[in-house]
Image (spheres, helix red, strand yellow):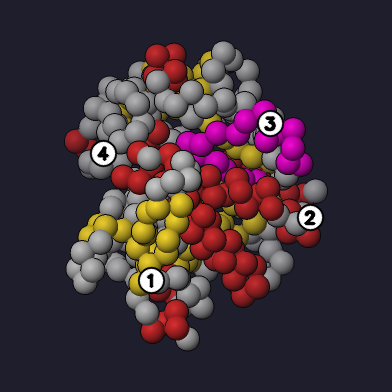
Amino acid sequence: MMRHLLSFFLLLLVTACGTNKVELLIPQEPDYSNASQWIFSQRDSTGHGADFFYIVSTETADWTDSVSGSICHFANTYNAEICRNMTGEMKGVDHLLNAHCNYYAPYYRQVTMDTWANDSLGAVCFQTAMSDVRCAFRYYLEHYNNGRPIVLAGFSQGAMAAKQLLKEMPDSVMQRIVATYLFGYYVTQEELDNYKNLQPAMSETDTGVIICYNSVKDAECAHSTDGRENAVCINPVNWRTDSVPATVLTVGSPWKPAAEQPVDTLTVHIDPATNFLFVSGYTGNDHVLPLMGCEGNYHSREIWFYRESLRQNIDRRQAAFRSR
């Protein structure tokens, strides 16, 4: 009851150094029984298809509470303006990638882009974001899923959360996972060694696997990310895990009408030394996100570049899952 009476509460947290304390403004917890806390489309009336559960990427910035004057490092899921970009991405992914699945995408108190500039603060704040994602997925399983197969996906911060869900997922639920798409994130060798649910995809139709890749222009961009170990990569055009290249057509940007842009022929291959996707042939201007390194880091286009291939692949993995 108090959760609904109070819009915000203050939580005292200790930073990583253990000496300084930071007072964080935490927005109201999402209530996933409230339809306003979801973007969803229920397409399949047969009961024989799959669900698509999507966790949105970082789409919010720090904002100032008008009452307390404090800066908030989380999305407020009850504020439509703060969540406007989240809504756009959630609806956009449904449009670009989802042909037949029932679609569920929860709002959550995601960590803002500004906050990730401080690794320690970002890690602390992500605990709140991850708690929301767990609650949303649990509510989805109990009230929406009805035992159907599940395509799980997340982009960037959303992929970070999806990977954590997999690490914690019980066998009874894991048996329903068609595949997990970790767009624009990474998996380390240590994680592969210690979490049985993290099984890299090796082909176009294997199931119960993770699909993971990160797109850059060249080795310089790959090395300018953050030095993270990246042990998993599959080419989302030819679905190979070696360095054989593939080509794909794409318009330059998701932010302008296609008629105003040239159509690029991209050549995409895996670089074995870094496990990054190297992409050549893109003529558009980069939309360089904060903290994403240099011009030529195509993090913001991980879905856009390969949308047709990804859409087909989601359907093919579902068909393979049903046949097995």
Evaluate if marks 1 and 3 touch, with contact meaning CB atoms under 8 Å apart.
no
Can residue 220 be seen here? yes
The residue indicated by pointer 1 is 9
Which mark lies nearer to you, 2 or 1? 1
Badge 3: residue crowd in 10 Å (few <14, some 14–19, many ≥20) = few
Which mark lies nearer to you, 4 or 3? 3
Going 44% across and 14% down the picture, which residue do you hit?
A: 219
SS label for mark 3: helix
Residue at mark 3 to residue at mark 2: CA–CA distance: 21 Å
Q: Nearer the viewer, residue 27 or 225?
A: 27
Q: Nearer the viewer, residue 192 or 321?
A: 192
Which numbered disc, 1 or 3, marks the residue that appears first in the sequence? Answer: 1
Evaluate if marks 2 and 4 touch, with contact meaning CB atoms under 8 Å apart.
no
Identity, as a three-letter code, of the amino acid under mark 2: Asp
The residue indicated by pointer 2 is 171
Marker disc for residue 258: 4
Which numbered disc, 4 or 1, marks the residue that appears first in the sequence? Answer: 1
Going 57% across and 43% down the picture, which residue do you hit?
A: 181
Whether residue 103 appears in magenta in the rendering, the answer is no
Residue at mark 4 to residue at mark 1: CA–CA distance: 45 Å
Q: Is residue 245 above or below residue 106?
A: above
The residue indicated by pointer 3 is 190
Which numbered disc, 3 or 2, marks the residue that appears first in the sequence? Answer: 2
Which numbered disc, 2 or 1, marks the residue that appears first in the sequence? Answer: 1
